[in-house]
Structures are given as structure tokens and as C-alpha cells.
Image (cartoon, rainbow, N blue to C red):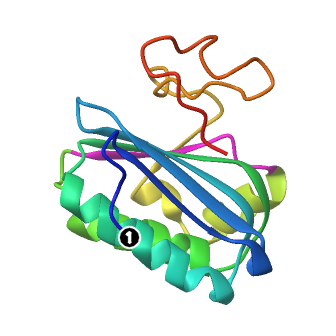
Amino acid sequence: MLPSPDGVFETSDRERTITIRALAGVDRRVHLSLAGEIDLAATAALSSTVDWLRTLTPISVLIDLSELSFACATLPNFIVRIRQFLSSSAEIVLWRPQPEIQKVLLVTDMATIATLRDEPASPPPCVPDSTRGEDEGCPSRGRTLV
């Protein structure tokens, strides 16, 4: 699946309760939001996301993990696949993991290839909250990712 003309890539597997929303910035910084459960059944959706990311050659990938309810070794494998094609100077930021998800990341030593943060180093791309209205808070894009 390719991104839409406005640079948004969305994939969802509702049977397996995973949603991936991604927004690529013009500065080659990418913001991914993962929600639901990341397990072996999510592999196809994650692979599509990796394929899309590879076309962007990003310099930074911020992965918002705050809405993940479960993750197994599939999540670290996904992060490793991203790291494999990024340049050595590119960063991966794992943002706002829940305590259970953070344990998976620490046990699998993800801190050696990515940075774990509660807050990003720079603000993520504007992704308006649908409860506030599409244009509010993000007037230049007016795009709600749901």
C-alpha cells in the first residue's frame, strides 16, 4: 500500500485490533502511531509499514506506543527491520510506551538501536484530535487520522 497524495499512510487490521497511522513530514521525519495488539498476526500490516517507510528514507522515525495494549517479540522485530534500512545517523524514538510494553523493549535490548522517551525531542507532526474538529490545532493540514 502506498501513501495517499498528502503523505499519509494508514493500515488497519481490525480483526487483530492493530491500527497503524503514519504521517511523513516534508523534512523526512516520520511519526508512526501503533494501537491495539502487536503479535504475529500483525506481521502483514507491519511489513506494509516497513515497505512504505523504506520509500521515504527518513532521518527520524518517532513511534508512538501509548495506545498499544499488548506486544510480543513482533514489536522488537519490527523496530529492527526499520533500523536495518535507516542510515546510521537516523534516529528511532520509541515514545510513551506503557509499562508492560516498556518491559518488552528493555528485555529485548531495544535501547541499543532506539531511544525510549516519555516526550519526543521535538514535537511530532500535527495530528489533530478528532474530538476538537478536523481543522482545529492543525490548520495547515486539516487532516484527522482515524
**Front-most of 51 and 107?**
51
How crowded pointer 1 is (Cα within 10 Å; few <14, some 14-19, many 20+) is rated as few
> Residue 70 appears at what percent x and percent y?
80, 68
Which residues make up the magenta segment?
Answer: 90-98
- Residue displayed at 53% across by 15% down: 138
Q: What residue type is labelled 1?
A: Met
Whether residue 41 sits left or right of residue 87 in the image: it is right
Whether residue 31 can be seen here: yes
Whether residue 45 sits left or right of residue 133 in the image: it is left
> Residue 130 appears at what percent x and percent y?
73, 29
Quadrant, the C terminus:
top right
Whether residue 80 can be seen here: no
Whether residue 122 sits left or right of residue 128 in the image: it is left
**Front-most of 72 and 16?**
16
- Residue displayed at 53% across by 30% down: 143
Q: Is residue 85 above or below residue 138?
A: below
